[in-house]
Amino acid sequence: MKKAYLILGNGEILEGEQIGAEGRCVGELVFTTGMEGYLETLTDPSYAGQIVIQTFPLIGNYGVIEEDFEGTPALRGYIVRECCDEPSNFRSQYPLDRYLKSRGICGISGLDTRYLTTVIREGGVLNAMITDTYPDDLPALLEELSAYTVKDAVASVSRKKPEVFPADGETRFRVTLLDYGAKQNIIRSLCSRGCEVTAMPHDTPAETILAASPDGIMLSNGPGDPAENTFCIGELTKLIGKLPIFGICLGHQLTALAMGGKTEKLLYGHRGGNQPVHDLLTGRTYITSQNHGYAVISDSLAGVGQISFINANDGSCEGILYPGKQCFTVQFHPEACSGPKDTAFLFDRFISMMEETKHAKG
């Protein structure tokens, strides 16, 4: 195997083996704790601009299954402890390394991913580079890493034109999905509940959405700093209170900003399928899938929104209800594939909200 190098923003250099595409990549270094679902991670648009570390040591063991993709990959690079060359699964179509090469994704294997995770947990997210050539001019590379930021992330992953997805069976509701980097299973989850989904670009004006008279609006996940999306936030102020709204992840954050709240960057974020969330309404705790580096500051919405979920580890905001606005949002992923699916009932809550609104209108 050809050598590859991981250069951290703190100046540390680690040597491993190249997987995926040749060359180099620069990105924000983050880790995900999922023990499965590496295909969903690779194809999640919310990783735009980032180099992803898989903490689980063996990746690629069930190969690549295109049916499981969530979208077009937007991550910058990929780091694993061990990459399986010979997958064993009846659904496998080809090995992971072939997929990385076909998508131009630089990767590195043979690193101590638990050590890298510790570096991030103790010092916070930092930038990094994967390269297949040893750095001759480290000061210049560190300057490049220091200057790197994830910008215009939502615009880079949102669809460019509307697309309609028919309901499974009879059409009960028509839902407009604002695509900030939507995972495909959000659409599947709605369609399976009798919704015809019209996915719209992130910069669709509120007037266009309201003119179509949908039964509800779905706000998707997406990458980057939520506060950067000033146009989207402004359009949401025109939509909130007009129709039932359900927001996930970035959609949750943008709604909070539209309602006058604030967001902050977390030290290392929440990424993986084992994030505990406490339901303040019922007292129950759910295990959820998450992928975000920013969080809503709960106190910034005092008197405006009701905090409905909090993270059981750090107490950060995981969900908000907006009384009188027909709107609720969550930071985690109730549509998660490959799981867990503990909170899929939130889609049913959205369906009930649209049903009640429809009956009220007669």
Image (cartoon, rainbow, N blue to C red):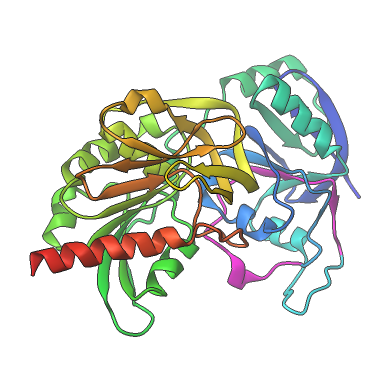
Residue 134 point in image, percent of width and height? 83, 30
Query: What residue sits 76% from the left and 25% below the top?
Result: 119
Say whether residue 93 is left or right of residue 44. Answer: right
Q: Is 19 part of what is drawn in magenta?
A: no
Residue 8 visible somewhere in the drawing: no
Q: Is residue 216 above or below residue 117?
A: below
Query: What residue sits 62% from the left and 44% below the top?
Result: 275
Please tell me which residue lies in front, 77 or 248.
Answer: 248
Residue 329 point in image, percent of width and height? 37, 46
Quadrant (top left, top right, bottom left, bottom right) of the C terminus:
bottom left
State the image quarter where residue 148 is shown: top right
Residue 210 visible somewhere in the drawing: yes
Say whether residue 188 is left or right of residue 261. Answer: right
Most distant residue in the bottom direction: 169
Most distant residue in the right direction: 1
Q: Is residue 179 above or below residue 348?
A: above
Most distant residue in the left direction: 362
Most distant residue in the front direction: 283
Please tell me which residue lies in front, 130 or 193.
Answer: 193
Say whether residue 121 is left or right of residue 252. Answer: right
Residue 108 point in image, percent of width and height? 79, 44
Say whether residue 73 is left or right of residue 347. Answer: right
Give the magenta-colored segment's residue range.
Answer: 63-85
Residue 193 point in image, percent of width and height? 38, 73
Q: Is 71 part of what is drawn in magenta?
A: yes
